[in-house]
Image (cartoon, rainbow, N blue to C red):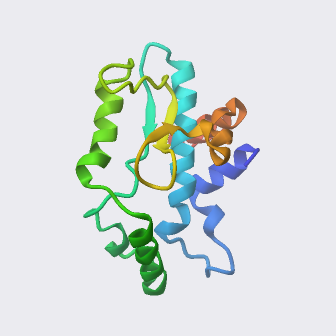
Amino acid sequence: GNDLDYYINILNGKAYKTKKNKNKYTPQDGYGHIKGMIAFYTAAMARRHGDIYFAAVSPGSTKDTYLMDQGSFPNALKYVFKGFICLSGQHGVDVGAGRYIDALVDNNGGRDGWGYKSGTFVCSKKGYIGEVCDATELKKGKPFGEQSKQDLVHEAVRSFMLR
């Protein structure tokens, strides 16, 4: 989105209330939007607070989290996703959690060469597991580097919190 209302309507749920879905919100509706907004907001905060290290980190496709079994996906869709996950692979919770730990304790390019600058959205380089990268290095991730979108999300979140 390129305007403030787009992001505000995601936060307040209006973006999901359509005739098609009978004006009902389900968790899978907002998952991708919110994940993206977290990345934009993280980058905006990093620019505003240069003395604090910020990172948005995706744990990747992680086994034993039972995401598909938490009631947020219709059964048919759940089985399609489970099949996709079997084909694309998953890593253990230790690897997913390790991404967060690396961001927290290794943000200066230490032992594992984490070295991502503050405000980076770190995700899987290819697919949902394996090596990580700065999302802006990916073709689909370029928008995460757009300061105008970062600022819109920052403003939307602030306006939502200050209501």
Q: Position of residue 6 (x, y in %)?
A: 70, 51
Q: Position of residue 36 (x, y in %)?
A: 56, 47
Q: Position of residue 1 (x, y in %)?
A: 72, 49
Which image quarter holds the C terminus?
Answer: top right
* Residue at the (45%, 40%) spot, across then down: 132
Residue 99 visible in the shown view:
yes
Q: Is residue 106 above or below residue 18?
A: above
* Residue 112 vs residue 48, the one in the foreground: 112
Q: Is residue 5 above or below residue 147?
A: below
Which quadrant of the figure has residue 158? top right
* Residue at the (51%, 24%) spot, across then down: 46
Which quadrant of the figure has residue 103? top left
* Residue at the (57%, 55%) spot, across then down: 33
* Residue 36 vs residue 122, the one in the foreground: 122
Q: Is residue 57 above or below residue 108?
A: below
* Residue 162 vs residue 143, the one in the foreground: 143
* Residue at the (59%, 35%) spot, across then down: 154
